[in-house]
Every structure is written in C-alpha cells, then in structure tokens.
Image: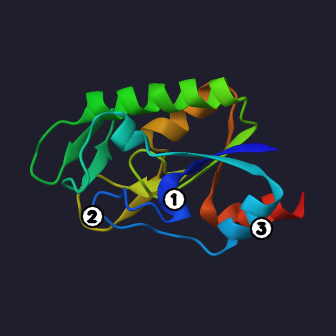
Amino acid sequence: MKLLISACLLGVCCRYDGASKQYKQVQELMNRHTLIPVCPEQLGGLATPRAPAERQGEFVMTNTGVDVTEAYRRGAEETLRICRLFGCDAAVLKERSPSCGNGEIYDGTFSGTLTAGDGVTAELLRQHGIQVFGESALHAILEE
C-alpha cells in the first residue's frame, strides 16, 4: 500500500519548532508499505522554524496574530496533488497539528486545550475521499 505520511514522523526536522516527532512504529510501517513523506506547512511556503499556529475556525493564526491561512491552504492543495500523483491509498498525519490533525486539534487559544476538529490538510484529504490516520492509529494499519 502507498501511504502519504507526515515527514516529521519519519524524523525530518520540519515541525514549527525545527524538531521532528519520529515515531517508533513508522519503521515497521516502512518495511511493509511505500511511504511518501510530506510537510504541508513547508509545501505551503512556511519556513522552519516558524511561529506556532492554531486553527481558529476557518483561519490559521500564529501566536503573534499573523494570519497564515493561505499558506496552510496552499500546503494542503500541494499535499493532495502529491497524494494523487503517487496514488496513495491513505495518509498517516501528525496528530493535533493545525495542518495534519485528525479528529482533535488545539482550540486556537494557545493554551494547550484540545478540541474536536481536523487540520487544514487532513480536512481537504478527507473531502477528496482519502482515509486519514493519526500516528496513534499505526497499529491498525500494521494489523491489516
């Protein structure tokens, strides 16, 4: 199976803070499936490191009040294009991210509070019929 995957889960230092969030089970996933790494925020033109951002309704704002919605939308569109180009069957995306969050994201107050919702990229992929998983659901993919 071909899977789109958040590059930070593979150990690429592309997160807003310049770090990665390498996830142990990704190695096993890589042994069984073809992984296509993406960082929607970088694909949208944002630098690494960058100011933390959270969704506030339809907008994505940094903690300094800068509207970065358009960059997040561009990155989501590029991610969808890559997904289609490589014929990916599903996506494994970084949980809680304003781009990649799957079912639960930060609430936009920069207080660490979580709320129901999807990141911009996860939302767009779902709208186009792509199944989206967070890293905590890797066990389900590995059991298939």
Quarter assignment of residue 127: top right
- The answer to whether the residue labelled 3 contacts the one labelled 1, judged by CB atoms less than 8 Å apart, is no
Indicate the secondary structure of the residue bearing disc 3. helix
Question: Which residue matches tag 3?
Answer: 139
The residue most toward the left is: 64
**Mark with earlier residue (2, 3):** 2
- Disc marking residue 95: 1
Q: Answer above or below: position of 41 versus 26.
A: above
Q: Answer above or below: position of 16 versus 100.
A: below
Task: Kindly identify the amino acid type of the residue bearing the numbered disc 2.
Answer: Asp
Q: Which of pointers 2 and 3 indicates the residue nearer the eye?
A: 2
Picture coordinates of residue 68 (x, y %)?
Answer: 22, 36
Badge 2 crowding class, 10 Å Cα cut-off, few under 14, some 14 to 19, many 20 or more, is few
Query: Could you tell whether 142 is left or right of 126 in the image?
Result: right
Q: Nearer the viewer, residue 109 or 98?
A: 98
Q: For marks 3 and 1, give the CA distance.
A: 15 Å
Q: For marks 2 and 1, give the CA distance.
A: 16 Å
Query: Could you tell whether 105 is left or right of 56 in the image?
Result: right
Q: Nearer the viewer, residue 113 or 38?
A: 38
Picture coordinates of residue 85 (x, y %)?
Answer: 64, 24
Quarter assignment of residue 144: bottom right
- Disc marking residue 17: 2
Query: Could you tell whether 20 is left or right of 9 in the image?
Result: left
Q: Residue at the location (18% across, 48% down)?
A: 62
**Mark with earlier residue (3, 1):** 1
Indicate the secondary structure of the residue bearing disc 1. loop
**Mark with earlier residue (2, 1):** 2
Task: Kindly identify the amino acid type of the residue bearing the numbered disc 1.
Answer: Glu
Q: Answer above or below: position of 49 versus 23.
A: above
Q: Residue at the location (23% across, 57% down)?
A: 49
Quarter assignment of residue 137: bottom right
